[in-house]
Structures are given as C-alpha cells and as structure tokens.
C-alpha cells in the first residue's frame, strides 16, 4: 500500500496530487489544507478524474491522524501572493512558510509518522532544514526537491539551444533553490561530450545562458502568477525514485555535513530516503559558488535560530 500525504493544496500541491493520481503512483492520498472548501473540491475533482483511469487512488481529507502510516508526506504549503510586488525573491516567503512549518510539524509527528518528509515549500533549503529540526526525524528521511527543478530547467534550456533531446543533457544545477544557485558546467555533458567542447565553436555566452536558466521561473510567474507543473514533476520524480528503490542520483536538497544544513547536491535516493551524497569534482570557481550558496542559506537560517528546538 503506497500512501502519500500532501499538506497544502494550492497550485503546486494540487498539481502534485493530480500527477500522482493520473500516474497511478499512490494507492492512498491524504489531502490537508487550511481551506476546507478547497480540499473537498480537489478531492471531488480527483475522484472524477479516475473514471477514465486503469488505476484507483483512495482519497482522504483533513485528517492528520491518517499520516501515521504514510510512506511519504509532501509539504507544499505557501503563499504565492508574496510575489505580487514583482520583487521575485523566494526568501520573501520565509516569514510565512516558517510559521507553516512550526504549525504543521507537531501535528505530523503527533500522528506517529515515521516516513519520508519531502519539502517543496520555498525557500526550499531553509524550510527543509527547519522541518528536520522541528520534527526530529533522521536527516536521511527529510529532504527537499532542491535544485532538481533547476536542473530540469537547465536541461530544457540547453536542449533548446543545441537542438538535441533533453535526455542527451546530463549534469547539474547545484546550491540553493534560489538566486544563488549555479550551473555546474564542469558536470554537464551532451551525449557524453563535455559541454565546453560542444559549445566551443558556437561562441556561447555562458553567463547569459546561466541567467536564462536561473530566471526561467520568473518568466513563468510573470505570465501566469505561479509555477506548478515543473515542480510537481520534480516532486513526483523523487516519489517514484523512493517507491521503486531504484537508487538513482538526483540533485535534491539533502543534508550537507560540512555546512550543517540542507542544500541542492547530487544525492543517491532509495526506499529508505537519502542513501549518500554523491561527490562530484567541481572546479575551484564552482566550489566557491557552492560555498557562497551555503552561506546564503545559513544567513536565512540564522533568522530562525531563536525558534529552533534545543
């Protein structure tokens, strides 16, 4: 029995729920949101969706106790209206999402939950670190989508630039899921060829290309007010990796023992959670960017430290 809980049924949480149901990934789905009417509406809509599917997902609503035997709980709560000022800063959500973490973590743990906690709430790395401290769950059982979506955006941008398949693009965006993230060009290959070699004759502006990757989210938000499908796909990719126990390496927000926080880095994932961080040989400049990103995450964590459990 594959049981998943989703806390937060906004654009992102609803997209995750829809994807899980239509792909037949969850046998049971627990939906929780502060808006009772929204949860009921999503439940009914998802039930209608199943009429044309070969799979069935039993949907439960508004019951934290049902999380006691969940395999995975996905935290998708947030407030996208924070971006209405046009400042485009994921850290601006921290005041709201840290409060959500403080409110939901005790309720989750009171149920007896001992599964995997997957955070997709922004700022992802900060909230994931905070959730682990608040829940007390083992570090390998708590992680965030991190730079997986950013890596997917990198693959799409490069595939468009080079007119090749997405599957031919391998490599990572690393660091914070935010403005300090970076494209680790030394890790990227195109059909096994190093990206630097592929782009050598194209006079490509790497800085402009990296900016296009990093700002892709804001293009989406400026047009429709939020992102949903991409992050839902990233979250479901992680869920599938967990259930299949495939031991795949993904750039998620996992525990970094050196910096003592969660950050986007290549991580081996299995049925029990994160298995280990996969070392990649970064250039000196890339390592500096990674360290800078970790420092930025820590600065935001410092603003919460007074509230952390002792």
Image (tube, grey):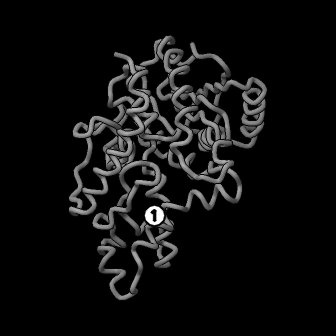
268 above or below 285? Answer: above
x then y, percent, for residue 180:
41, 54
Q: Is residue 99 left or right of residue 200?
A: right
Say if residue 3 shows up in the picture. Answer: no
Say if residue 167 shows up in the picture. Answer: yes
Q: Residue at x 37, y 29 (%)?
A: 141
Quarter occupied by residue 252: top left
281 above or below 159? Answer: above
Q: Is residue 64 left or right of residue 38?
A: left
x then y, percent, for residue 142:
39, 31
From the viewer's side, name the closer residue of 73 and 222.
222
Q: Residues within 10 Å of mark 1 (few under 14, many from 20)?
A: many
Quarter occupied by residue 256: top left
In the rendered image, the residue lying farthest to the bottom is 201
x then y, percent, for residue 91:
51, 43
Q: Residue at x 36, y 43 (%)?
A: 263
Find disc 1 in the rendering and name its residue: 154
Q: Residue at x 55, y 20 (%)?
A: 103
């Amino acid at each position: 029995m594959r049981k998943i809980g989703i806390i937060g049924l906004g654009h992102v949480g609803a997209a995750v729920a829809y994807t899980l149901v239509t792909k037949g990934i969850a046998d049971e789905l627990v939906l929780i949101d502060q808006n009772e009417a929204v949860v009921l509406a999503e439940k009914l809509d998802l039930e209608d969706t199943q009429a044309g599917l070969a799979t069935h997902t039993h949907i439960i609503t508004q019951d934290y106790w049902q999380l006691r035997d969940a395999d995975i709980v996905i935290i998708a709560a947030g407030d996208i209206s924070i971006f209405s000022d046009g400042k485009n800063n994921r850290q601006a959500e921290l005041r709201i999402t840290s409060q959500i973490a403080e409110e939901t973590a005790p309720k989750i743990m009171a149920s007896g939950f001992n599964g995997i906690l997957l955070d997709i709430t922004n700022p992802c790395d900060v909230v994931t670190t905070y959730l682990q401290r608040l829940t007390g769950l083992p570090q390998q059982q708590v992680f965030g989508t991190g730079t997986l979506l950013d890596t997917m955006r990198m693959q799409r941008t490069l595939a468009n630039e080079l007119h090749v398949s997405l599957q031919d693009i391998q490599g990572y965006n690393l660091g914070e899921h935010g403005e300090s993230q970076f494209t680790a060009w030394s890790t990227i290959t195109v059909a096994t060829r190093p990206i630097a070699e592929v782009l050598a004759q194209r006079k490509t502006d790497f800085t402009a290309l990296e900016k296009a990757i990093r700002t892709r989210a804001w293009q989406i938000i400026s047009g429709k007010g939020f992102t949903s499908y991409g992050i839902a796909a990233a979250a479901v990719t992680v869920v599938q990796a967990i259930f299949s126990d495939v031991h795949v390496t993904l750039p998620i927000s996992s525990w970094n023992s050196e910096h003592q926080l969660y950050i986007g880095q290549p991580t081996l994932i299995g049925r029990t959670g994160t298995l280990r961080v996969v070392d990649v040989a970064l250039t000196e400049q890339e390592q500096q960017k990674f360290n800078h990103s970790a420092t930025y995450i820590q600065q935001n964590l410092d603003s919460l430290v007074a509230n952390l459990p002792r």
